[in-house]
Image: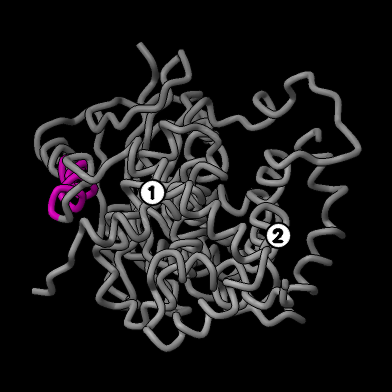
Amino acid sequence: MIAVDVRKLYEQYGFLIHGRCLGILGSQDDAQDAVQEVFARLIESHHRIRDPEKVVAWIYRAAQNHCFNVLRQRRKFRGAIDADEVVSGEKPDSELSRRQIIRLALECHNRKVREAVYYTHIEGLNQTDIQKICGQSPATIRRNLRTFEKSLPRLRKRLAL
Amino acid sequence: MTTEHVYSRIDLETYAADGFDQDKRQTMREHIESCSTCTSYLTKLDTDRRSFLEKYPHGSDIPQYSQRTSTQIRPIFAMAASLLLLVGGLGLLQVYRQPHQDGFRSKGAVSIDVLVMSRGGELQARPDHIYHPGERIQLTYSCAQDSRLILVSIDERGEITSYYPSEGDSSISIQPGQDIPLPHSIELDDYIGQEMLIAVFSEDPVALADVTERIRQSFARAGSLLTMDPVIGHNAEVRTIVYTKTREG
């Protein structure tokens, strides 16, 4: 059995997990629930992340995966019909909000495109950091962002944004 | 004097979390002392950490590994147990899962589950539910890694309906997770009798036409749903749920 200093891990990384989760979920209560989930995964996985320098990148990825799943689940369980929820009467703005970009990113079926969009437009990370998190080269990130931009009109139409 | 900013956000967050060894830490410290961008971001991180730990101190809220695991597994076991009881004891609704015998990958468990939507739109796992035409169900899946999924149903007449993909001719991409709802709910059709839901999880894209043809062949060989063991190939994992629909009232 591998001993993990849970308190130390929490004090080191809890606030980073919280920041990521709050940024995606937007509510303190939801973020705290998500912190518990992601932190529990960190405890489980910590012995496998051998290089301590990689823990933060791991957190980005785990938090993004978990929170996107929460958003999908919440959206579907509310009635399972997206259109009813999406068409809320808001007029589309020329500038997409953070929430809207998250919704658009959720619609990307290609995981790599979704990650490139999320880490670039939501987290505002540079390509070096994105490469550390998900292994995409700068050229691949740029290509995936172009793919997203091309699909934007279709996605925006589908989501009525 | 301010030097050129060189460290990325993840570097600084790792530094703030004390994730670097002493040498790297020392090198960074020398830079940080003369970089206003790094200093400013580290100050913000320090404030975030203090405020987080003040609001959510380490304590009983943190789930233990054993608790979390049992919580995740319990609903699936409970449902499976209920389903087994139903198969043995009730004639109205028969739902059960068949582990598939062929083409297993060994990279983690996959499963599908059915949630029933009430008239109020709430979704519930109701293993003792009697299904009727027109009723809405929501399917959820669990898988351990990025995968592709095709979900079809076949009835006793051998008619196959594709639910996922609902458009297009190839398996849909799904993310790893536990009990993740599929993109939209399903309205049960008017057919009365037994049907089998077949979920095909694969690592690579699979053509819908190929899967339906293989299911058709499996059905023809077996002659009935209950004896059918869908052989899909493609190194895919297959999960099935058989249920019986009755007329309402």
**Count of picture labels:** 2
Q: Residues within 10 Å of mark 1 (few under 14, many from 20)?
A: many
Residues rendered magenta in the picture: B66-80
Residue B151: give x, y in percent of width and height: 50, 54
Q: Amino acid at mark 2?
A: Val
Q: Is residue B70 magenta?
A: yes
* Labels 1 and 2 within one chain: no
Snapshot quadrant of residue B65 = bottom left
Residue B93: give x, y in percent of width and height: 25, 31
Please tell me whether mark 2 sits on a helix, a strand or a loop.
helix
Snapshot quadrant of residue B111 = bottom left
Chain letter behind tag 2: A
Residue B156 visible from this viewpoint: no
Residue B220: give x, y in percent of width and height: 42, 64
Q: In the drawing, what numbered circle is on residue B196?
A: 1
- How far is disc 1 from disc 2 in space, using C-alphas? 38 Å
Say which residue appears at 15% left-offset and 30% top-offset: B90
Q: Of residues A88 and B204, which is closer to you in this image?
A: A88
